[in-house]
Image: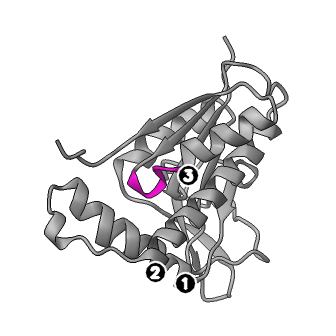
Amino acid sequence: MKRSLVVVSNRLPFVININEDGEPVRTNSAGGLVTALAPLVIKHRGYWVGWAGNNFTKTMKIPDSKDSTAIGHGIKPSQIIPIFFTKETYQSFYNGFCNATLWPLMHSLPTLAVFKAEQWNSYVNVNEKFANAAFQAVKKFDDYADRNNLVWIHDYQLMVTPMMLRNLLDEANISCKLAFFLHIPFPS
């Protein structure tokens, strides 16, 4: 059975830095997510949706990997769907709602949680960008109507992305499996 895969995570499977010549270069990302999922994206000729980082702009092209030993070396630039947002949005979304509200709540530390409406709004807006990008990735598959296609969304930064993506897929009458994996504890 053929299955196409879209991985959606807060960050891309590599960091994009700018070298001394002003060119974007890939730098290995640390962590188990890349180690586990990059081979699957490569094998299934899938896509990886993630934040491009502060060093990468919309006018730049994703570079090929120069390091043949890197875990994500085989992921081609055409398989990467970068998400862009301003430093202010990143601050409000990631450092604000994700890390100042959700992280303490998920770790049963509600007295440390900070609640700000503008941070929630940033969280929703960023999740919407991820859902739209994942939707575009699904539509790139030749067999995008195949029920075996899978979008695998990761972690607390993207907890509302699955609902948003499901709505987009349903409106377009596209069948696709969605999976969500939470990498931190859920309070009980």
Q: Which residues are magenta?
A: 156-160
How has the structure been colored for display?
one colour
Comes first in the chain, label 1 or label 3: 3
Q: Which mark is residue 87?
A: 1
- Main SS, magenta residues: helix
Q: Quadrant of the N terminus?
A: top right
Q: Are marks 2 and 1 in contact (CB under 8 Å)?
A: yes
Q: Residues within 10 Å of mark 1 (few under 14, many from 20)?
A: few
> Under tag 2, what secondary structure?
helix
Amino acid, disc 3: Ser
Amino acid, disc 1: Lys
Comes first in the chain, label 2 or label 3: 3
Q: Quadrant of residue 112?
A: bottom left
Q: Which mark is residue 91?
A: 2
Task: Locate residue 57, reporting x and y percent.
Answer: 70, 78
Residue at which label 3 appears: 68
Does residue 180 appear to the left or right of 174 in the view shown? left
